[in-house]
Image (cartoon, rainbow, N blue to C red):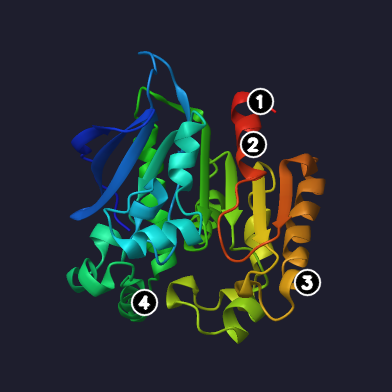
Amino acid sequence: MVPCALNPRSAGVEHMDGYTREKMFIETEPGVIMPFYVLKPEGVLPGDKLPAVIAPHGHAGGGKSAVCGIDDGDERLKRAIREFNYAYGAQFVREGFLVFCPDARGFGERAEKYRQSGEYLLDSSCALLNAMALPLGMNVTGMWTWDLMRLVDYILTRDDADGARLNCAGLSGGGLQTLWLAAMDERVGNAVVSGYFYGYRQALLELNNNCSCNYVPGLWEWADMGDIGALIAGRGLFVETGDGDPLNGADGLDNVYPQVEIVREAARLLKNEESVRHHVFAGPHRWCGEQSVPWLKERNFGLK
């Protein structure tokens, strides 16, 4: 990864119900452009600094579109937003956060062109990118993490963002991105990982039909998901898990609880156990938000 000037530019602002939605672009590497939406509550006064949430997406939602609640009249997107409760970016802006919803490499506007429309609208090309990256000593997880770190760089330049109250929250592949960004970048104060916290062996090796973008070569020989989460144990981590999520692995919640306990043990050592939370909700693989959103509001606004 090669740093460069961010060169931010805007493609226009739309007025939504209670907030604005601005489409923007930054350069994360020389010639590598990341599009994203900025969702901002209306009525913010000049000089006000808001807590920020980066809201990365997962699969099957057209990239940033589903997180923003944008269906463009497409029945497949409408169904994905409804099925996965996918519009958590729009949910966060309505709670007073400044929200950033990016396209990850291989998704949305960053998918290879044959995947950007038509029958492939909800698909991605991240598996193809990973197949090309691995022989070159790279991987998509690393690329995604780098891009989000560059988005953090940009957020910290904004007059309306409070860099001391920076958060990340995502579902599924967005949980993957949230987990790795918060683990690797201590500027992220709080992380909400939804539908993506379980033991690697059952959920990503034995259950081997997952997208290859999940895999960092050799990682499982040395660490498990709880060990990555433990890197966040000195800050705030909220994990939410559907009790009927098939991605939890053959043992279901028994493949999840030990990984959360690894993080809790690290938090105990750091005298920060109260900042690690786990909510198990009744349901399948989807964003819940019932407890995680109030938790994030309390940690940023002091509200219960």
Outermost residue on the top side: it is 46
* First of labels 4, 1 by sequence position: 4
Horizontal and vertical percent position of residue 107: 31, 63
Describe the element under mark 4 as helix, strand or loop.
Answer: helix
Describe the element under mark 1 as helix, strand or loop.
Answer: loop
Q: Is residue 84 left or right of residue 127?
A: right
* First of labels 4, 3 by sequence position: 4
Quickly name the residue at label 4.
127
Between marks 2 and 4, how big is the CA–CA gap? 35 Å
Describe the element under mark 2 as helix, strand or loop.
Answer: helix
- Assess disc 1: are there few (<14), some (14-19) or many (≥20) residues with their C-alpha within 10 Å of its C-alpha: few
Between marks 2 and 1, how big is the CA–CA gap? 8 Å
Describe the element under mark 3 as helix, strand or loop.
Answer: helix
Mark 3 or 2: the one toward you:
2
Camera-side residue: 47 or 64? 64
Amino acid type of disc 4?
Ala
Between marks 3 and 2, how big is the CA–CA gap? 26 Å
Between marks 4 and 1, how big is the CA–CA gap? 41 Å
Amino acid type of disc 3?
Asp
User: In the rendered view, would you say 15 is above or below 85?
Assistant: above
Amino acid type of disc 2?
Pro
Amino acid type of disc 1?
Leu
* First of labels 3, 1 by sequence position: 3
Q: In this view, does 99 lie to the left or right of 179?
A: left
Quickly name the residue at label 3.
254
